[in-house]
Image (spheres, rainbow, N blue to C red):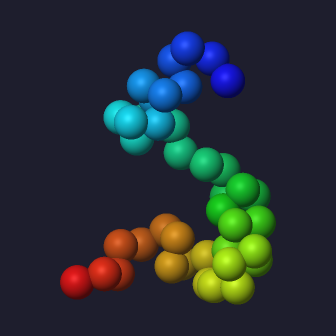
Amino acid sequence: MTINTPLTNCSNSAKPSLETLTEIAKALDVDITELLYHTKK
């Protein structure tokens, strides 16, 4: 972790790779599209 990491995360300018999102989706047992698209109304 660098000093810039918290600022990058807060500004949402750094996004996880598709590989990382795939692993997160598998761990949560959800479709990856649920992580990619805002579906909450």
Residue name at image x 31 percent, y 81 percent: 40
* Closer to us: 18 or 5: 5
In which quarter of the view is residue 2 placed?
top right
Does 34 appear above or below 3?
below
- Image quadrant in which the C terminus is located: bottom left
Does 1 appear above or below 30?
above
* Closer to us: 36 or 4: 4
Residue 25 visible in the displayed image: yes
Residue name at image x 75 percent, y 74 percent: 27
Could you say where residue 36 lies in the image, as x and y percent from the top left?
49, 68
Horizontally, residue 21 falls left or right of residue 8, namely: right
Could you say where residue 30 lies in the image, as x and y percent from the top left?
63, 85
Residue name at image x 51 percent, y 18 percent: 4
Residue 22 visible in the displayed image: no
Horizontally, residue 34 falls left or right of residue 18, namely: left
Does 14 appear above or below 20?
above
